[in-house]
Amino acid sequence: MNKLELQRAANEIRKGIVTSTHAAKAGHPGGSLSAAEIFAYLYFEELNIDPKNPKKPDRDRFVLSKGHTAPGLYSTLAQRGFFPVEDLKTLRHTGSYLQGHPDMKKVPGVDMSTGSLGQGISAAVGMALAAKLRGDSYRVYTLLGDGEIQEGEVWEASMMAGHRKLDNLVVIVDNNNLQIDGSIEEVNSPYPIDKKFEAFNFHVINVADGNDFEQLAAAFAEARTVKGMPTAIIAKTLKGKGVSFMENSVDWHGKAPNDEQYAQAMAELEKAGEQL
């Protein structure tokens, strides 16, 4: 896809995030919106996947380590053709397969059930190590929140990844600088994030604007050239990106828009889509 097509895909992903959380009257829009470009680039450009055959053995694996941003992943999977876009409106409803956190046994295209912060990267490291042991060619990608990396398990997994030289692993940190109750600097600062991953023997790529497709494309292209060590992409993003009243606001970490807010958000996204 070209840049314009990717921008349109990200905008549609944002519409799905707003629609699903509004329908659920719950969910996590802020960190889903900040990662819309990352989701779009992965699923429309980077990953070797097939919506018609979600379990194909040689597929690249993706693990949403920050599992609470399931609305972003679900919207992306729907846009990519894994299941109907209309189903996004069933988010968190009783009986729906689209629950608050991804379930690999129920959702087509989900490779790992996640939600307990820190555990997703551990599963991703296991998948990457399994590929190495079996001689398989697939790559493994995992998306973490910057608040999530306050979890010790993240660094245990990173230690193993660096030790085993897992150059088929790409760890992406959605660095929007906000977590559930404040800025990550105020709560428990993980900065400097890049230096920490370097200390665990990662090749680190800093992306100044993780909502810019050209910068993301360059980062993922560079990651593919790295041999003998895992890669960490630290992407600075804007929490709530694309919806004016949600942008850079901690209030929208885990809150759904009401009817009036939904109408405003969708109007903004419709206008953004028309401009593309």
Image: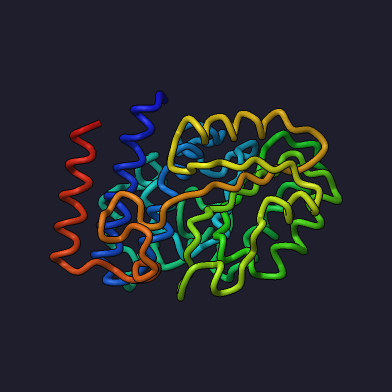
| Residue 260 seen by the camera | yes
In the image, what residue occupies the spot 27% across and 57% down? 18
In the image, what residue occupies the spot 58% across and 59% down? 65
Q: In this view of the protein, which residue sits in the foreground, 118 or 63?
A: 118
Q: In this view of the protein, which residue sits in the foreground, 139 or 69?
A: 69
Examine the rendered structure and indicate whether residue 89 appears above or below residue 271: below
Examine the rendered structure and indicate whether residue 217 appears above or below residue 205: above
Q: Quadrant of the C terminus?
A: top left
User: On the image, which quarter does residue 59 sit in?
Assistant: top right
In the image, what residue occupies the spot 35% across and 28% down? 5
Examine the rendered structure and indicate whether residue 158 appears above or below residue 54: below
Q: Is residue 177 left or right of residue 95?
A: right
Q: Quadrant of the N terminus?
A: top left
Q: Position of residue 171 (x, y in %)?
A: 64, 49
| Residue 52 seen by the camera | no
Q: Describe the colour scheme in one phrase.
A: rainbow
Q: Is residue 113 left or right of residue 204?
A: left
Spot the residue most to the right.
163
Q: Position of residue 215 (x, y in %)?
A: 51, 33
Q: Position of residue 270 (x, y in %)?
A: 18, 43
Q: In this view of the protein, which residue sits in the foreground, 259 or 34?
A: 34
Q: Position of residue 238 (x, y in %)?
A: 42, 52
User: On the image, which quarter does residue 152 sit in?
Assistant: bottom right
Question: How many discs appear?
Answer: 0
In the image, what residue occupies the spot 29% across and 60% down? 20
